């Protein structure tokens, strides 16, 4: 039986037995873990900090480290701004009430409302950005940068 139309070069060269396979720079589950890093901030920023500490030194998980650091930085910045932004007007309100200063109390109340609105908008923007980061990480985009200002507490 003759083998007509047989071309021995039609198949690619097979790797030799026992030879190391080429290694990609990213772990196979890094994309899913990066998605989880963006979403874990909804539990608390502590969950994102834990993810960062687990994957910060593991080879192949640089994308997870970067995603967790950026998510943590935005979440902790929003938390700090919320605490500081609510304490200052509350102190002003207490001083106004203690001093029987009605005008200062009105200013403090207006300031509390304005700060609450600004912090609420910033919080909603943070939630939206975390969701966008998770969707982009799931799609394979590994370098999502949050468009919100954030303290650089963790290096990415």
Image (tube, rainbow, N blue to C red):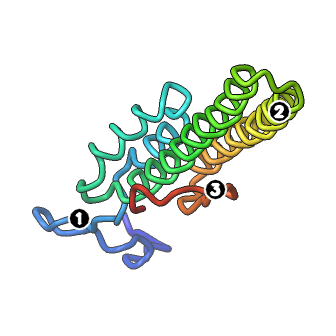
Q: Secondary structure under badge 1?
A: loop
Please give the residue where the numbered disc 2 appears in the rendered image: 104
The residue located at (52%, 57%) in the rendering is 151
| Residue 126 % position (x, y) | 68, 42
Q: Quadrant of residue 38?
A: top right
| Residue 17 % position (x, y) | 13, 63
Query: Is 25 displayed left or right of 116 in the figure?
Result: left
Q: Nearer the viewer, mark 1 or mark 2?
A: 2
Which image quarter is the N terminus in? bottom left
Q: Secondary structure under badge 3?
A: loop
Q: Give the CA distance from mark 3 to mark 1.
A: 36 Å
Please give the residue where the numbered disc 1 appears in the rendered image: 21
Mark 3 or mark 2: whose residue is earlier in sequence: 2
Pointer 2 local density, CA inside 10 Å: few below 14, some 14–19, many at least 20: some
| Residue 14 % position (x, y) | 28, 68
Q: Give the CA distance from mark 1 to mark 2.
A: 72 Å
| Residue 15 % position (x, y) | 24, 68
Mark 1 or mark 2: whose residue is earlier in sequence: 1
Q: Give the CA distance from mark 3 to mark 2.
A: 37 Å
């Amino acid at each position: 039986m003759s083998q007509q139309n047989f071309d021995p070069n039609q198949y690619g060269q097979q790797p030799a037995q026992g030879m190391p396979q080429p290694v990609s720079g990213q772990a196979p589950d890094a994309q899913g873990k990066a998605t989880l890093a963006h979403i874990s901030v909804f539990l608390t920023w502590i969950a994102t900090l834990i993810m960062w500490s687990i994957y910060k030194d593991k080879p192949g998980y640089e994308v997870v480290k970067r995603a967790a650091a950026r998510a943590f930085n935005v979440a902790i910045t929003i938390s700090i701004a919320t605490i500081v932004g609510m304490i200052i007007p509350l102190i002003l309100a207490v001083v106004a009430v203690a001093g029987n200063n009605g005008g200062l109390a009105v200013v403090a109340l207006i300031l509390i409302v304005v700060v609450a609105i600004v912090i609420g908008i910033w919080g909603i923007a943070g939630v939206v950005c975390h969701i966008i980061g998770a969707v982009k990480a799931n799609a394979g985009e590994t370098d999502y940068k949050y468009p919100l200002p954030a303290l650089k507490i963790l290096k990415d």
